[in-house]
Image (spheres, grey):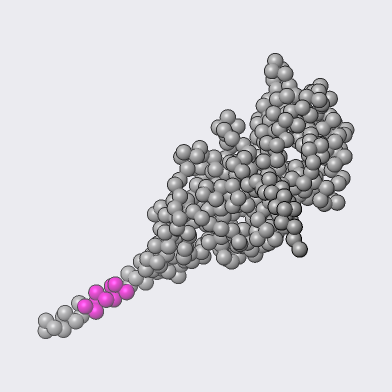
């Protein structure tokens, strides 16, 4: 028989540990299972684990632990930083650090402090060497091109993050305020991830960075929040594919007036889209940005909107071929079927709560243009009778002959009537 007094005591202890799983400070998430299971490799580090979620989880990542320690030691020695000073700061920030993660961290305080110290030291030294272009002998391993590329990609995965504030503060603790010619940590960060900053966003124009995945998203948003388009609840519906639009007479054109990837424009039958390079990392980067928006920016999901528009435009390899011919897509994957499948898979199991008003209007205008019978007629004439200058000339000549024949026939009929 159940002892009610013991049960009450046990249950009260359970309730004491009940806390909100996600707080306002939370910004680093496990990718939702329904999305993650579709392509786990896109969310799992390949060579280096950062933070608590993947620490000691994958044997392939163990090799990098020694190099992380080497880099941490090198940064402390380079800056003559007191390890005790670092430890004192991290111990004080430990609870705030834990609140940045969507799941309870299984490591105790001592274990977690060690993880933070080593991972932060590794990143600080990595960024510093990249800035200083210091190719010392102990860099032989990490300077291998394929490895350095995968490290950079691993640092952009949503589950593989440290809060930006702790990196920033440890960097500041490592240099005296009187030290000259030392770049800020945000400048080092922009330099290290400069390849992805296609909009050439300045570090001075970014007010808040929560972590590196958040920074990647910010690179693409470019404009300050107050100037971003408003959003509506309506989803994208019945928007034609690139092939259907092309057959209806829509002309695709690379938008060169803006370096912001998200600035689409449709006017006068011309759909302008900024150029996108599609390579081996494209899917990984978009998947992690979309996952971040699913968890942290559900009402500001501008990257998800963009992925949705591409998903709608691209159904088959034929759609991809059209966008490649118009230089909207630069295909480094080789196989156009792979490109089509990649864009079609990006939105699987993704929940769309709102949509950019600008994109909604573009999709409405595209659909209306496609349904207009006059546009389809003009497109058919161009496609079937005006493919080349000679064919156009022949078509015009045939029309002229037809008109002259018709006039001659009418004149003959009138002459007969007058008689």
Query: Relative to residue 228, is residue 105 drawn left or right?
Result: right
Residue 32 sits in which quadrant?
bottom right
> Residue 15 or 10: which is nearer the viewer?
10
Task: Say if 108 sits above or below 325 in the image.
Answer: above
Determine the main secondary structure of the stretch shown in magenta.
helix
Which residue is pictured at 60% across the width and 65% down the height? 317
Quadrant housing the C terminus: bottom left
Q: Position of residue 237 (x, y in %)?
A: 47, 63
Q: Is residue 387 visible?
A: no
- Locate residue 380, reporting x and y percent: 42, 69
Question: Which residues, given as a range, are shown in magenta?
Answer: 402-410
Give the total number of marks visible in the rendering: 0
Q: Residue at x 62, y 37 (%)?
A: 209
* 404 within the magenta span: yes
For the point 79% across and 41% down, the residue is: 108
Residue 308 visible in the picture: yes
């Amino acid at each position: 028989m159940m002892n009610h007094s013991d049960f009450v005591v046990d249950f009260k202890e359970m309730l004491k540990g009940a806390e909100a799983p996600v707080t306002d400070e939370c910004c680093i998430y496990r990718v939702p299972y329904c999305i993650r299971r579709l392509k786990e490799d896109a969310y799992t580090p390949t060579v280096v684990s950062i933070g608590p979620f993947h620490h000691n989880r994958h044997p392939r990542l163990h090799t990098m632990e020694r190099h992380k320690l080497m880099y941490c030691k090198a940064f402390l020695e380079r800056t003559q930083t007191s390890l005790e000073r670092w430890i004192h700061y991290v111990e004080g920030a430990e609870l705030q650090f834990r609140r940045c993660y969507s799941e309870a961290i299984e490591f105790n305080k001592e274990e977690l402090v060690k993880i933070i110290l080593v991972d932060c030291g590794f990143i600080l030294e990595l960024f510093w060497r990249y800035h200083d272009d210091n190719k010392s002998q102990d860099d032989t391993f990490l300077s291998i091109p394929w490895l350095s590329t995968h490290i950079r990609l691993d640092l952009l995965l949503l589950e593989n993050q440290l809060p930006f504030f702790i990196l920033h503060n440890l960097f500041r603790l490592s240099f005296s305020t009187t030290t000259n010619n030392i770049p800020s940590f945000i400048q080092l960060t922009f330099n290290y991830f400069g390849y992805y900053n296609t909009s050439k966003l300045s570090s001075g124009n970014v007010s808040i960075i929560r972590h590196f995945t958040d920074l990647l998203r910010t690179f693409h948003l470019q404009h300050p929040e107050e100037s971003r388009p408003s959003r509506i609840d309506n989803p994208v519906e019945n928007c034609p594919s690139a092939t259907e639009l092309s057959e209806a007479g829509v002309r695709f054109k690379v938008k060169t007036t803006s370096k912001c990837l998200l600035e689409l424009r449709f006017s006068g039958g011309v759909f302008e889209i900024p150029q996108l390079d599609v390579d081996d990392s494209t899917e990984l980067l978009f998947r992690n940005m979309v996952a971040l928006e699913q968890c942290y920016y559900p009402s500001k999901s501008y990257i998800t909107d963009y992925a949705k528009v591409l998903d709608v435009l691209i159904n088959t390899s034929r759609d991809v071929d059209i966008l490649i011919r118009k230089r909207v897509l630069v295909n480094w994957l080789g196989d156009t079927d792979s490109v089509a499948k990649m864009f079609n898979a990006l939105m699987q199991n993704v929940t769309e709560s709102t949509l950019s008003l600008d994109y909604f209007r573009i999709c409405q205008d595209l659909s209306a243009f496609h349904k207009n019978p006059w546009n389809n007629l003009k497109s058919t004439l161009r496609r079937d009778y005006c493919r080349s200058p000679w064919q156009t000339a022949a078509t015009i000549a045939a029309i002229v002959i037809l008109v002259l024949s018709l006039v001659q026939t009418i004149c003959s009929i009138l002459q007969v009537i007058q008689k």
